[in-house]
Amino acid sequence: MTTPSRKQMLELAVIGTFATKWLIPRLPSFTRAHADIVINLSTRNDPFVLDGTAFDAAIAFAHPAWAGNESRHLFRSALIPVCRPDLVLPSRRRDGTVLSTLPLLHKTATPESWPDYAREFGIDLQNATAGGRFEQFSMLIEAALAGLGVALVPYLYVADGIRSGELIPLGPPGRDTGKDFIFVTGATTRQPDLLGEFSNWLVREATSDAPPLAAEDSISPRT
């Protein structure tokens, strides 16, 4: 009610960790270029019926439950193993060979992620299913920052933490263990041009944060 009439508003449903760890820190670059647009965010971690809600769009993981909606593929969430730097002795190699010596942290809904990651890179993980379980990626990241073990999380969520040195990667990003982010709109889109412009910006931002080819040496400071 207090928003000036000349302002345009986008009501977006987003995955909570994606919003806090990636989207919100980057929103200033969008709002600086689009001072007439107000972005409102609400958390929705699971698929829902978009039509008939107040939302213009949702940013979500691809899932069959979104069938019937218009969707655009945004980017793939490649998973990467990370931990706090002091969890690994300086003399140890920071790659997949050290993973069997450290506690592994798991996302409750995807217990197969570590075995899949080990299979992709030919790593012999004796402890692939052992370790603490956490419901959300945000919890996994905080657990890794607290020194509880190694978290296997989307690279997009920890790119800034790796660049700042808060976290270190212990292997390359896994291409077979991630999920696809999609931009979902209802059957009747109220602001197609505005939504198209916003989704184009999302893709450009994600491209600039694409995972490195090698885990550590190719990570460069954000400019």
Image (cartoon, rainbow, N blue to C red):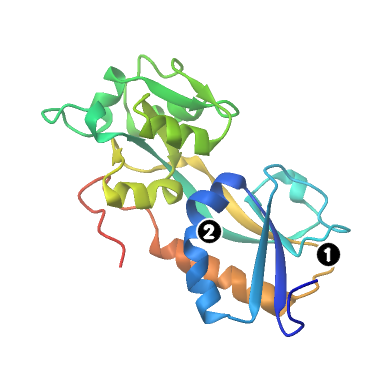
Residue 174 image offset from top left, x and y in percent: 40, 41
As drawn, which residue projects farthest toward the left? 91
- State the residue at coordinates (43%, 64%): 207
Mark closer to the chain start, 1 or 2: 2
Q: Which residue is mark 2?
A: 24
Q: Label 1: few (<14), some or many (≥20) within 10 Å? A: few
Considering depth in this image, is 166 or 173 the residue closer to the camera?
A: 166
As drawn, which residue projects farthest toward the right? 52
Residue 153 image offset from top left, x and y in percent: 45, 39
Considering depth in this image, is 43 or 196 the residue closer to the camera?
A: 43
Question: What's the residue type where badge 2 is placed?
Answer: Ile
Q: Is residue 83 left or right of residue 178?
A: left
- State the residue at coordinates (40%, 59%): 209
Q: Are marks 1 and 2 in contact (CB under 8 Å)?
A: no
Q: Say above or below: 32 vs 215.
A: below
- State the residue at coordinates (26%, 60%): 221
Question: What's the residue type where badge 1 is placed?
Answer: Ala
Q: Is residue 188 left or right of residue 174?
A: right
Work out how far the residue at label 1 is from the one at label 2, CA to CA, in angstroms.
Answer: 27 Å
Query: Which numbered tag is attached to residue 187?
Result: 1
Residue 164 image offset from top left, x and y in percent: 28, 50
Residue 141 image offset from top left, x and y in percent: 44, 37
Q: Is residue 210 left or right of residue 165?
A: right
Q: Say above or below: 183 vs 80.
A: below
